Image (spheres, grey):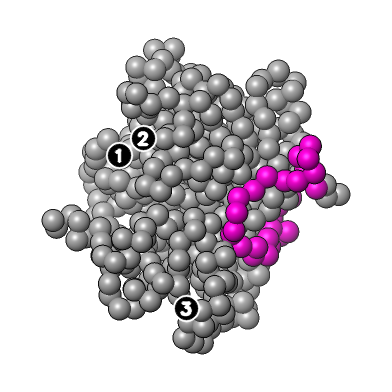
Amino acid sequence: MFFIFTQKNGKQRTFKRGSHPEHHKGRTEYLPIERMPFVEEYTLPLSQHIGAPSLPIVQKGQQVQRGEVIAKPGGFVSVSLHSPVTGMVTAVELSEHPNGQMLPAIKIKTDPYSTQCFGKAEPLSDQKRDKAHFISSVQSSGIVGMGGAAFPAHVKFFIPEGKHCQFLVINGCECEPFLTADHRVMVEQAPQLIEGIGILAEFLGAQKTYIGIEANKPDAIVILNELAVQKNISIEVVPLQVKYPQGAEKMLITAVLKQEVPSGKLPLDVETVVSNVGTVIALTNYFTKSEPLVERVVTVTGSGIKRPANLLVPIGTPIQEIINVCGGLNEGATRVLLGGPMMGVAQKNLGGPVLKGTSGILVLTDEEVQEMQLYKCIRCGRCLQACPIFLNPSHLGLLARKGLYDDMAQINLMDCMECACCSFVCPSGIPLVQSFRVAKAILREKEVKQ
C-alpha cells in the first residue's frame, strides 16, 4: 500500500524548478539488505574523498586486521583509510580508479581462514566524544559523506569560531532514480540513525533537527516518526515532494527550512549542517562500537542485472565480484554506472572497486542507452526552467563551446552542482553538464597555476 504524505496545508515541501525523471525504484525498494560475501582481493584507492589523498602507512607483505588503519589523513581535508578485511598487503601501487585515472591504491589479499570479525567491540571513551576530540575522532574513523559526494565528514562538522549551528538537517531524500540504499538503511537501521542524530546534534549544539524524506518512501517516514515519538526526541520528519535534485544540500535546506543559501556560501552560513543518513549511521557504529568505515550499503539494480539487490559491501570490492553475486549480466547489458543515471560515472573496466561514496551499481541495456543526435540550441528555455540554482545553462553552454571559461566564471559557473537537470530536459541532446565539468576543471587548474 502506498501513502502520499502531505503537510498540514495539504502541500509537500519542495524547492523551485528541478526535473521529474522516472523513479525506477521498484526493483529494490523492498529488498532487505544482504551481506556481500568476502572475496579474494580488495583494492583501496587512496583518493576516495574530496580533498587530499590518504597517505599509506603499510607496505607490501604486511599483515593487517579488519578495521586496521592502512593510510593516514593527507591533510585536514582528508581522512584515514582502513582495511576492510583481515589479510596481507600485496601491493601499494598505481591502479585504475573508477574515475578512469591511474591513482595510488593499496591492494589486500584476504586471509581465507579468518572469521573477518572486528576485534572486541568497545564504545569510544567519553573523552573522544567531547567537543575537543570529536573532530579528530571522526577524521580517524574514515567517515565521509555517503550520499555520493564523499566530502570528509569531520570538515563539515567543524564549526569555525564565530559560526553557529541552529539546525541539523538529515538527508534521507535519495532523489537519484533507481537507488534505494538510503531507503533501506532508514527502514532497517532506524534506531542507529536516531542514536547517531543524538550524538551529532549534541556536538553541534543544534536546537532543532529535521529528517527530510521524499514521499515515495512512506515506510521510512512512518518508522522514523514512530521512533522519534517513542523516544520523545525533538526530531521532525519532513515528507518532501518527489523531485530531482531534492537531496542536494541547498535544495534540501530550501525545502525544509524555506531558506536560501546565498551564492558562494555554505549551509553553515545559514546556521545549518546537512548530513546523509548513511553518514550518521556510520557515526553511530564508530562511537558505539569503534567500527571505522570499511563497508557500505550499495544498490545493485537495472534491467541489465539478473538479480537486483541491496548489498552491504566491503569498501574496495571489485565491481565484477558484486555483479557475479547478483547472478551476472542479462543479455543486452551495455553500460555499468557507479551511482544513478543522473550523476553516475560510466565504467570501462569492471575490475574497479567500490568506494566510500558508491551508493549504487546501475546496469543498463542497449535499449535504455540511446545516443542522442546533437542539434543546435533552439532557445526553448527548458534548461533555465529546470536549473534549481537559477543559472542560464544555455548561455553557459554557448560560452563553453567557444572556450570562454573566464566569462563562464563571471556568470556563476562554479555554483553549478552538476545535477544534470539541464542535460536531462534538453531536446537538442546538448551535453551541457559535461561541458560545465570540463570548464570547471580548466578553471581550477588555472587557479592552481596562478
CB within 8 Å, label 1 to label 2? yes
Question: Which of the two labelled residues, at mark 2 and mark 3, occupies the earlier sequence position?
Answer: 2
Q: Identify the residue shown where x is 71% and y is 18%.
A: 232
Q: Amino acid at mark 3?
A: Ile
Residue 203 seen in render: yes
Q: Secondary structure at mark 1?
A: loop
Write down the residue under mark 2: 155
Residue 430 image label: 3
Q: Secondary structure at mark 3?
A: loop
Q: Where the C terminus falls, by quadrant?
A: bottom left
Residue 77 image label: 1
Q: Secondary structure at mark 2?
A: helix
Classify 10 Å Cα crowding around label 1: few (below 14), some (14-19), many (20 and above): some
Q: Amino acid at mark 2?
A: Val
Classify 10 Å Cα crowding around label 2: few (below 14), some (14-19), many (20 and above): some
Q: Identify the residue shown where x is 72% and y is 26%.
A: 227
Q: Identify the residue shown where x is 70% and y is 25%.
A: 228
Q: Amino acid at mark 1?
A: Val
Residue 200: % across, % down: 50, 25
